[in-house]
Image (tube, helix red, strand yellow):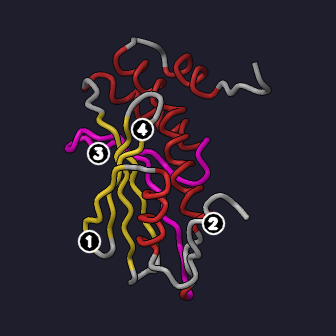
Amino acid sequence: MTSTEQYLDSGEMHPIDVVETLAEHYDWAFDRVAEDQIAMAIEGAWRTYSITLAWSAYDETLRMICSFEMAPPEEKLPALFQAMNLANDKCWAGSFSLWDEQQLMVYRYGLMLGGGVSAAPEQVDQMLSAAVMACERFYPAFQLICWGDETVERAMDIAMSEAYGRA
């Protein structure tokens, strides 16, 4: 039995109920915005990420947006977009997008649950973990490009360098 299974049995639970139960389990700050939407904050090493999940019964999709503030200088946008494309090539489950008007970098993902399939706690947990891990991995590169005067190649080398083994 996994750690999340002991806290809930998703059976016929509404997908946002599954998310809320996980948020309570991990002691994350959250707000049930509506029956089909929840907003929460998850603390990372670099910053606190704002995460919103919304359930669409119409297309049976649980949509997640993980965001953090990003207001890059206008002259850095081409380099940032290049870095986002490179980051998106490395993210199989979701993708980065810049919402310039809101000054937010967002990582988006949609979990399709067609045919009345329920969201398993492990799926939701993995979706949230993947979002935070992607943001944690690429946040430093985005920062270095926008404010550290690093080249896209150098900044992405730093972000894409993964440690193997243990120290």
What residue is disc 4 on? 43
Q: CA distance from mark 1 to mark 2?
A: 26 Å
The picture places residue 133, in percent across and down from the top left corner, at: 55, 40
Q: Answer with left or right where residue 59 lies relative to residue 90.
A: left
Q: Closer to the N terminus: mark 3 or mark 1?
A: 1
Is 76 above or below relative to 70? above
Q: Answer with left or right where residue 166 lies relative to residue 124.
A: right
Secondary structure category for the residue under label 4: strand
Q: Amino acid at mark 3?
A: Trp
Secondary structure category for the residue under label 2: loop
What residue is disc 1 on? 34
- Figure quadrant of the N terminus: bottom right
Residue nearest the observer in this picture, 65 or 146: 65
Direction top: furthest residue: 149
Residue nearest the observer in this picture, 75 or 36: 36
Q: Is residue 151 magenta?
A: no
Q: CA distance from mark 4 to mark 2?
A: 24 Å
